[in-house]
Structure formats: structure tokens, C-alpha cells
Amino acid sequence: MEFEEYVSARGQELVRLGFTVSGDYQRAEDLAQIALMQAFRSWRKVRNADDPHHYVRRILVNEYLSMTRRRSFTEAPTADLDPQRTVPDHATRVANSDDLWRALATLSARERVVLVLRYYQDLDDQTIADMLGIKPSSVRATASRALASLRRRPAYSGAGESNRVDERLS
């Protein structure tokens, strides 16, 4: 597979993953662009990997986690430079209006990444552990803590409403 074919086939999926972990469409585009740029630099190595998409997703997740550690991560633009970019697509409107999304946004970056990879990307613990450079037991512990944190939120503890956050994630 050539790089251009990969970008055509998987580029939007990378932007969606970036949006799901970051909660910001512009940051998602930046994450996807950085991941693709880094993959392009070593495309021969990426292309020959067992799963090139896994390799590029790992680049994106690692870049997001690195980005959250930087001081500039908390900076926000003061003005919209491109008015067309301020109009969210349907998926963005749904994600922004969803209570679960707001709850995910309260989690730490690592907890959010683990839940996104587990429930939105449907990856197993071993694959997530490989992507994050941790042990599968750490993935399970992080997911457990994150789900417990979500369960403690008032929105999920109301009478008559399902308290099974992990069912809502699936």
C-alpha cells in the first residue's frame, strides 16, 4: 500500500480518533496531520509493519498524550480564523451534545485514551497496552478507575436511569 492510498482510506478515521480522544475538531485535525507526517517520514517501516494502521494510531495516541503534557495544551485561540471550520458536522454536534462525552472530558488524558481505544476503537487490552507502552493489567486498572469515576458522576446515579456506564460506552 502506498502512502497516498493509506491517507485516502484511513485519514478520516484518524481524525475521528483524534476528535474522540481530544474533544476538539481542530486539535483532532492537528493530531491526524502530525501522525500522518510522522508515518510518511518512515513509510517504508510503517508499510512493512504487521498492521500499519495500528502503527499510525499509536503515533496519534502518543502525540495526544505528549500534547497534554505541554504547557501550550491549555492555550485556546481567541478568535475563529476560518468561519467555515466553526460549523460542526453532524457527528461533532452529536458528540458535543452527549452527556457521556462531557463525562469523558472530565477524565485524565490516559483514562480517556484507554476508554476510547477499548470502547470506540474496539481494541483488546493487549493491543492498547502495546500502543501505550504499558502492561495489559495497567490497561484494565486504568479502565476500571475511569469507569468508577464515571459511575460516581451525578448524571449516572439518578433513579430510573441506567448506572451501567460501560453499557452506554458499548
Image (cartoon, rainbow, N blue to C red):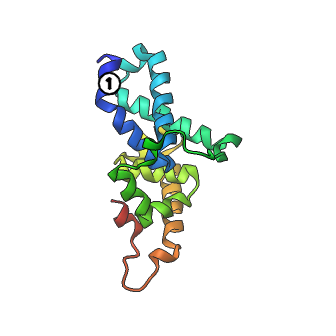
Give the residue at x 52% y 61%: 146
Residue 118 in sight from this viewpoint: yes
The quarter of the picture where residue 128 lies is: top left
Residue 141 against residue 133 in the figure, above or below: below
Give the residue at x 53% y 54%: 111
In this view, the residue in front, 113 or 131, is: 113
Give the residue at x 47% y 41%: 28
Which quadrant is the C terminus positioned in?
Answer: bottom left
Give the residue at x 63% y 47%: 78
Residue projecting furthest to the right? 71
Residue projecting furthest to the top? 44
x and y, in percent, of residue 44 in the image: 40, 13
Residue 137 in sight from this viewpoint: no
The quarter of the picture where residue 64 lies is: top right
Q: Secondary structure at mark 1?
A: helix
x and y, in percent, of residue 18 in the image: 45, 42
**Direction from residue 134 to residue 71 in the image, left or right:** right
In this view, the residue in front, 73 or 42, is: 73
The residue to which callout 1 is attached is: 6
**Direction from residue 162 to residue 113 in the image, left or right:** right
x and y, in percent, of residue 129 in the image: 48, 42
Residue 93 against residue 13 in the figure, above or below: below
- Disc 1 crowd, CA 10 A, few/some/many (<14, 14-19, 20+): some
Residue projecting furthest to the front? 83
| Numbered circles on residues, count | 1
Residue 147 against residue 33 in the figure, above or below: below
x and y, in percent, of residue 77 in the image: 62, 44
Q: Amino acid at mark 1?
A: Tyr
Which quadrant is the N terminus positioned in?
Answer: top left
